[in-house]
């Protein structure tokens, strides 16, 4: 599998349409649908803007409070950790198409940070990040690039 000159041994995508479509647009229509890559389940807050939520819960923070009727911080952390454990057993390069909040969670959990640190990691639409293991330092997880976007993309 190829993404702008980089070969991937496996490509995964969230089951949500926008992630699957992005995978298709990058030449990965055959990406494996991975339910654990889905966006945070916003439950009762699905479709609401931040200002609407804060109108009735001014101090609400997704990383500490989760979403009523959706996923809790413990559930999203467990989902990311489960995915990392499965992928750690894979050989070669892996590409994943996912979403903003879940991508932040995956990034901080990859390097062993607590969930709340995810609020400090911005992710833009159509950006990519590179997570790997440092072969020179006991294969410890690291973030090589974060929130990269194509310059001059149409």
Image: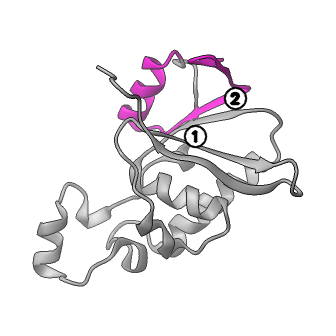
**On the rendered structure, is 9 left or right of 27?**
right
N-terminal of the pair, mark 2 or mark 1, is 2
Q: Residue at x 38, y 28 (%)?
A: 151
What is the quadrant of residue 64 in the picture?
A: bottom left
* Residue 136 within the segment the image draws in magenta: no
The residue identified by callout 2 is: 10
Residue 130 screen position, x and y as percent: 61, 42
Decide: is 49 above or below 5: below
Q: Quadrant location of the N terminus?
A: top right
What is the quadrant of residue 9 in the picture?
A: top right
Residue 54 screen position, x and y as percent: 16, 76
Q: Residue extending furthest front?
A: 151
Q: Nearer the viewer, residue 132 or 98?
A: 132
Q: Nearer the viewer, mark 2 or mark 1?
A: 2
The residue identified by callout 1 is: 34
Query: Is disc 1 surrounded by few (<14), some (14 to 19) or many (20+) residues within 10 Å?
Result: some
Q: Residue at x 57, y 56 (%)?
A: 107
Residue 135 screen position, x and y as percent: 86, 47
Name the element at disc 1: loop
Give the magenta range.
Answer: 1-27
Q: Residue at x 41, y 35 (%)?
A: 149
């Amino acid at each position: 599998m190829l993404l702008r000159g980089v070969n991937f041994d496996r490509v995964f995508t969230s089951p949500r349409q926008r992630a699957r479509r992005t995978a298709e647009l990058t030449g990965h229509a055959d990406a494996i649908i991975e339910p654990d890559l889905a966006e945070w389940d916003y439950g009762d807050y699905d479709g609401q803007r931040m200002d609407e939520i804060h109108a009735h819960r001014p101090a609400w923070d997704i990383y500490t409070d989760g979403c009523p009727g959706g996923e809790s911080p413990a559930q999203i952390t467990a989902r990311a950790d489960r995915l990392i454990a499965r992928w750690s057993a894979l050989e070669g390069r892996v590409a994943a198409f996912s979403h903003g909040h879940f991508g932040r969670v995956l990034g901080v959990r990859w390097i062993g940070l607590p969930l709340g640190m995810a609020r400090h990691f911005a992710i833009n639409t159509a950006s990519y990040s590179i997570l790997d293991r440092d072969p020179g330092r006991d294969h410890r997880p690291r973030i090589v690039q974060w929130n990269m976007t194509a310059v001059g993309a149409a």
